[in-house]
Amino acid sequence: MTEIVSTADTLGGAPRIKGRRIGVHHIAKRVIDAGDSPEQVAADYDLDIADVYRALVYYYDHAEEMRRVQAERQTVSDERSVIRSPDDLDTRTQSEPEA
């Protein structure tokens, strides 16, 4: 069974499964939010089932830290805009003030 680690240079310091770029928040999102089974998540990410459960235990045992990670990730995603076509670039350029 692999441990949960946090390193500043991987996933922005979010807790993850050691040796992988799979964050605790990724697993929690799949199991808790999406309703996927732990077995399915383990198969999709090529993990031992014990690693999925360890990530979920970490998620619940470190609720405040996980809320902070989720808030930080939400802030980053709110600041991004999706560009689907060249027209989106034109609209974005017109609405941004010049520096």
Image: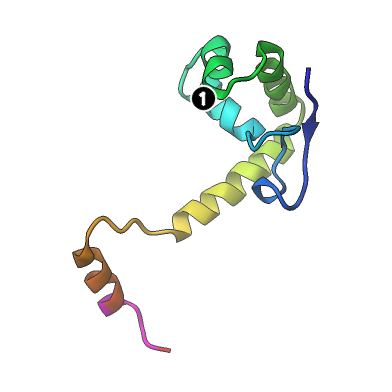
As drawn, is 77 to the left or to the right of 86?
right
Q: Residue at x 51, y 13 (%)?
A: 40
User: Where residue 96 appears, x then y in whole percent?
Assistant: 34, 78
- SS class, disc 1: helix
Q: Nearer the viewer, residue 73 or 26?
A: 26
The 10 Å Cα crowd at callout 1, few under 14, some 14 to 19, many 20 or more, is: some
Which residue has dot 1 on it? 30
Q: Is residue 40 above or below residue 94?
A: above
Q: Is residue 60 above or below residue 84?
A: above
Q: Is residue 85 above or below residue 56?
A: below
Tell me the magenta residue range.
94-98
User: Where residue 71 appears, x then y in whole percent?
Assistant: 59, 47
The three-letter amino acid code for the residue at tag 1 is Arg
Q: Residue at x 60, y 42 (%)?
A: 70
- Secondary structure character of the magenta stretch overall: loop
Q: Residue at x 59, y 26 (%)?
A: 28
Residue 95 falls inside the magenta stretch: yes
As drawn, is 36 to the left or to the right of 62?
left
Q: Nearer the viewer, residue 39 or 35?
A: 39
User: Where residue 98 appears, x then y in whole percent?
Assistant: 37, 87
Instruction: Please identify the quadrant where the C terminus is shown.
Output: bottom left
